[in-house]
Amino acid sequence: MTAYFDAAATTWDLKQQRVAQAKAIAEQIIENIPLTPQMNALEFGAGTGLLGFNLIDKVGTLTFGDTSKGMLAQVEEKIKNFAHQNAHVLDLNTTAIDSKYDLIFSSMVMHHIPNYQNKIRELITALTSDGYLCICDLDKEDGTFHSEETVPHHGFERSEIEQLFLDSGLTLVASQTGFINKKIINDQEVEFPVFIIIARKD
């Protein structure tokens, strides 16, 4: 999959639905989490940073982590072009998540990770006390959304993610629909809701 994202990186931001989704999710993060200039934040699976760059002025520092060098190159270009002094890039192929973050957020990433449970637990470990974790992904679907590619998960039941958070000692803050993707399938418009689940580490 990394090769796919490397190849798609330069045109990734041209899809307006992706841009709209990032903006909508960012607005809900702002509504549900008290962001401050003291926060150290991580976007896990950042891609080109579409979501993170909507939040960069609301936090103190923001690290964009990804495994795709092509995507990270786009992030670095944006950092340079807009002179973001508080932004950093983390190549997750070569560098582990060993810092502590007040906020970790991730969008449309977990369905690409076979053992998403362990990955979420790893992110929880990287949270500071009172830190926030925000996971956004597809609601459970029949595989139609990824009909042209193979992924380990066709979305998730929201209760799966909520229970994983609760079992890890987090307190749920919000669980709601963050955006609705639309695709034309067999000449019919089909809706694919994206959830946003936010929890706090006590």
Image (cartoon, rainbow, N blue to C red):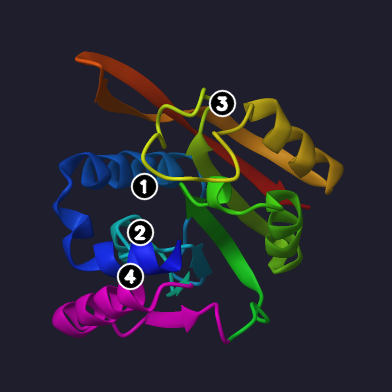
Q: Is residue 107 above or below residue 84?
A: above
**Which callout, 1 or 2, points at the residue further toward the start of the chain?**
1
| Magenta extent | 67-94
Picture disc at residue 140: 3
193 left or right of 76 in image? right
Structural crowding at the residue carrying mark 4, measured as other residues with C-alpha within 10 Å and reported as few (<14), some (14–19) or many (≥20) = some
Image quadrant in which you'd find residue 54: bottom left
What residue is shown with label 4? 6
| Label 2: element kind | loop
What residue is shown with label 2? 55
**Residue located at (35% from left, 63% from top):** 5
Distance from the alpha carbon under mark 1 to that under mark 4: 24 Å
Q: Residue furthest top?
A: 188
Distance from the alpha carbon under mark 3 to that under mark 4: 26 Å
Q: Nearer the viewer, residue 115 or 187?
A: 187
Give yes or no for contact between labels 2 and 4 (Cβ–Cβ under 8 Å).
no
Q: Quadrant of the N terminus?
A: bottom left
2 vs 4, front mark: 4
3 vs 4, front mark: 4
What residue is shown with label 1? 26
* Magenta segment includes 121: no
**Which callout, 2 or 4, points at the residue further toward the start of the chain?**
4
Q: Nearer the viewer, residue 10 or 150?
A: 150
Structural crowding at the residue carrying mark 2, measured as other residues with C-alpha within 10 Å and reported as few (<14), some (14–19) or many (≥20) = some
| Label 4: element kind | helix
1 vs 4, front mark: 4
Q: Nearer the viewer, residue 166 or 110?
A: 110
Badge 3 amino acid: Lys
Give yes or no for contact between labels 1 and 2 (Cβ–Cβ under 8 Å).
yes
149 left or right of 112 in image? left
Image quadrant in which you'd find residue 23: top left
